[in-house]
Image: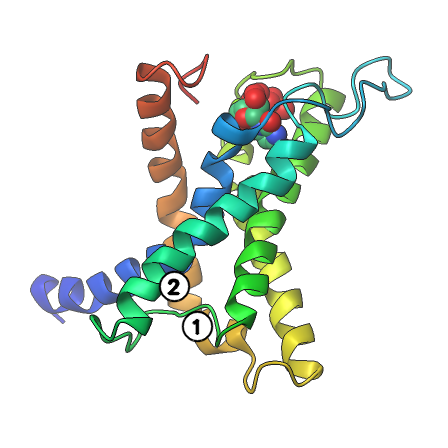
Amino acid sequence: MDVGAFLAMLWPTVLTALWLMLPAYLANMMPVFVGGGAPIDMGRRWSDGKPILGPGKTWRGLLLGPLMACVLVGFLRWLVVDTGWGRMGAWSTWGPAPWWFVFVYLMGLGALVGDAVKSFFKRRTGRERGASWPVFDQLDFVVGCIAFAALAAFLLHATGLTPTNVFLDDWTWPRILAIVVLTPGFHLLVNVIGWKMGLKDVPW
Ligand code: CTP
Ligand code: MG
């Protein structure tokens, strides 16, 4: 296969994969805006004397982040699905109404739970809030999101709420590979922009 044919095959996979991950990307970006207030660990410390998760992980960020992602994804979904403006084809709808909302929320929640679990291990390894931890900082939320998405889709299907398993419908191996390979660079780029805009203290 020549390079042109390979790229022609790659693009649809890459673009539909990034679309599929929008709930996680948006949920992961939102806490900077909607976070604050009580920390998840309520300021408690682990047996090593360091914070369990640290003050950068708050309940508002964890619970409102996915909700904001639902609102934005809902708008996009409405634009391309419900108005009949776009044909979805290979582009995920995250499931039929109203269950896409639950699925998208749980994708976002999974992303932020993955982020919080990462912070737990960051604190245990002596890294302060906001310290950089390459690879883990970029892929924590991908792992959390995919785990929650797989479980949520299984439960929605097993209980008969959705006619198909929406995870198996959309999450092909080439897409998962594209997400894992491209997310770190994408994540870094978004954080540098957020830092330049003064939203984040550090560029990672
Ligand atoms: N945030 C929040 N609640 C969350 C996650 C994030 O309020 N569950 C907010 C915090 O203000 C945090 C900011 O979003 O500082 C950036 O998130 P992140 O980079 O994940 O946190 P860090 O401050 O870098 O903390 P850590 O070192 O634990 O990753
Ligand atoms: Mg950070």
Q: Which residue is mark 2?
A: 175
Q: Residue at x 32, y 72 (%)?
A: 82
Q: Which residue is mark 1?
A: 170
Q: Are marks 2 and 1 in contact (CB under 8 Å)?
A: yes
x, y (%) of residue 159?
A: 71, 82
How many residues crowd around disc 2 within 10 Å: few (fewer than 14), some, or many (20 or more)? many
What amino acid type should be assigned to the residue bearing mark 1? Asp
> Is residue 35 found left or right of 30 in the rendered image?
right
SS label for mark 2: helix
SS label for mark 1: helix
Quadrant position of residue 161: bottom right
Q: Judge whether residue 133 can be spotted in this image.
A: no
* Disc 1 Cβ-to-ligand 1 distance below 8 Å: no
Q: CA distance from mark 2 to mark 1?
A: 8 Å
Q: Judge whether residue 187 can be spotted in this image.
A: yes
Quadrant position of residue 14: bottom left
Q: Residue at x 63, y 58 (%)?
A: 148
Task: Name the quadrant of the N terminus.
Answer: bottom left
What amino acid type should be assigned to the residue bearing mark 2? Arg
Q: Closer to the N terminus: mark 2 or mark 1?
A: 1
The colour scheme of the drawn protein is rainbow
Q: Quadrant of ligand 1?
A: top right
> Is residue 123 found left or right of 107 in the rendered image?
right
Q: Nearer the viewer, residue 197 or 3?
A: 197
147 in relation to 121, above or below:
below
Q: Residue at x 28, y 74 (%)?
A: 88
